[in-house]
Amino acid sequence: MAMERRATRRFRIKLPMTVRWTNLLGNWEAHAESENITSRGVYFFLPAEIENGSSVELVIVMPPIALAERVRVRCQGRVRRTEIEDMDRVGVVAGIERYQFLRKGEKTGSKVSKILAKRGNQSDLTQRE
């Protein structure tokens, strides 16, 4: 039996999410579903390859609790590892660096997306941008 070496507990739960990332070809967005999640990261599948170390924005939709409405959480993080399953199915491990609970009706576009849109998706962004 394999021993669990993770420092935080992993929950096998399928939560709907939107994934946004940028690369030299432009901005990308895909709808996905978590396979498992921890307080420090999430594992999910994308229909396209993404580079290790890429910045990602995840908007995870949490289930309603005690008759409240669904809560959306915006997470900023980086791709730690990818696993190619098929031509159109790539497993992604993304570490969560920070997160924010979104208010009802709050838009989910990130500052990075807005900067890229203003610059016309140019690839001359600084590391901070």
Image (cartoon, rainbow, N blue to C red):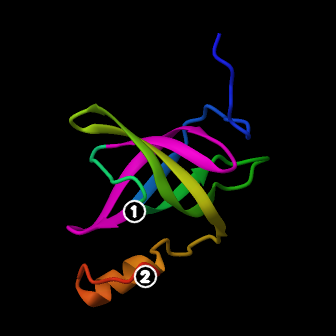
The prevailing secondary structure element of the residues shown in magenta is strand
Image: 117 above or below 92: below
Percent x, y of residue 47: 29, 44
The magenta-colored residue range is: 21-46
The quadrant of the image that shows the N terminus is top right
Pick whichever, 1 or 63, lies toward us: 1
Residue shown at the point (53%, 61%) measured from the top left: 77
Residue 45 sits inside the magenta stretch: yes
Say which label, 2 or 1, has the lower sequence index.
1
| Image position of 107 (left or right of 8) | left
Identity, as a three-letter code, of the amino acid under mark 2: Glu
Q: Residues within 10 Å of mark 1 (few under 14, many from 20)?
A: many
Specify the quadrant of the image occupied by residue 51. Answer: bottom left
Identity, as a three-letter code, of the amino acid under mark 1: Arg
Residue at the top extreme, as displayed: 1
Image: 121 above or below 102: below
| Image position of 47 (left or right of 35) | left
Residue shown at the point (62%, 70%) measured from the top left: 104
Residue shown at the point (46%, 41%) measured from the top left: 44
Residue occupied by mark 1: 20
- Secondary structure at badge 2 equals loop
Q: Which mark is residue 129?
A: 2
- Secondary structure at badge 1 equals strand
Pick whichever, 50 or 45, lies toward us: 50
Residue shown at the point (23%, 82%) measured from the top left: 122
